[in-house]
Amino acid sequence: MTKDSVLAILRNAGDYVSGEKISKLLGVSRSAVNLAIKSLRSDGYDILSSTNRGYFLKSAADKIDAREISAHLPAQRMLSVRCEDTVDSTNNLLRELAFKGAPDGQVVVANEQTQGRGRRGRTFVSPKDKGIYLSMLFRPNTLPSDTAEITAWTAVAVRNAIKRICGIDPSIKWVNDLLINGRKICGILTEVSIESESGLVQHIIIGVGINVNESLRDFPEELQKVASSLFIETGKNFSRAALAAAIIEEMDNMRASWPHDKEQYLKAYTENNFTIGKKVSVLYGASEKYGFAEKINDDFSLAVRFVDGTAANVSSGEVKLIGI
């Protein structure tokens, strides 16, 4: 497509490029180049023009599509990255693809979710043009019991991506949330499919939702005290495409490191954990117990000392922070 080719030339140049040079490089007319420039501008790309100098890409549009993500990832990796404008849930779409034979590492990323999901059936608010909604397929040849730590590993991977692209150090709330200043900016939802005959894991779908450029009014009133975004916490807008690409890279690193490089992920998870040292409540079904979060264990479970004097290593259920 001429428009994508023109954009690639401008992006790689880093300076003004004449319309004549672009037309010669692509083998198209100057009129076709002008139309492509006009179309790119209408898509939100800030392209300057100067007599005798040509065109200069001042800034890219904040889009999370194949055109923008491919600027940050190799072409080979993009073969298994599917970009959608709107889906009900990236996990749902990826599950369909998984049962149709999608490969290990297949990614679905969307600009909007109409039925975004969190843990325990909650809704994950996923407004259009604001956040990153991404799911990756993982096909480890392992038993279900061996996958209990994968959500914690993912939290470390996503944290690495945010730190690399945005220069921010989020903390991790056990087991699956990323926080800045005690407010949630990211949630992770992991779903495991097990083959009935062998008892082995058929596939794992890891869903990541990140609040990137939302303002406070983008959240329902009941969430405005607990939810936040990278923009709210820093006052800066960030490239969602660059961050999505970094998440894919860090999750690829995680898949390559699984399970032999556990020590590295456990260390990062422990050192950046927000829950340790806090008062917590632990939900077991309909019951709730209060206590104190003491440490992260070697299996990523949470050691809790309850107010009744008992203790437990929590590896499932839900942990809430008290007074935060």
Image: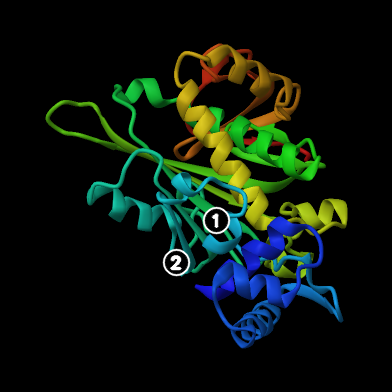
**17 left or right, relative to 160:** right
Label 2 SS? strand
Query: Which amino acid type is marked by label 2?
Result: Val
- The front one of 4 and 312 is 4
Residue located 74% across and 54% down the image: 229
Q: Is residue 98 above or below residue 115?
A: above
Q: Is residue 267 above or below residue 320?
A: above
Q: Which residue type does callout 1 highlight?
A: Tyr
- Mark 1 lies on residue: 133
How far is disc 1 from disc 2 in space, using C-alphas?
A: 10 Å
Neighbor class of circle 1 (other Cα within 10 Å; few <14, some 14-19, many 20+) is many
Q: Position of residue 163 (x, y in %)?
A: 74, 37
Q: Mark 1 or mark 2, which has the lower sequence index? A: 2
Residue 65 visible in the picture: no
Number of disc labels: 2
Coloring basis for residues: rainbow
Tag 1 secondary structure = strand
The answer to whether 83 is drawn above or below residue 80 in the figure is below
57 with respect to 79 (left or right): right
Q: Residue at x 40, y 49 (%)?
A: 80
Where does residue 61 sit, x and y in percent of width and height?
Answer: 70, 68
Crowd rating for badge 2 (residues with CA inside 10 Å; few <14, some 14–19, many 20+): many
- Residue 282 visible in this rendered orientation of the protein: yes
Evaluate if marks 1 and 2 touch, with contact meaning CB atoms under 8 Å apart: yes
Residue at the far left in the pictured view: 197
Residues 211 and 225: in front is 211
Which quadrant would residue 69 be assigned to in this image?
bottom right
| Residue 143 locus on image (x, y percent) | 29, 22
Which residue is tagged 2?
A: 87
Q: Quadrant of the C terminus?
A: top right
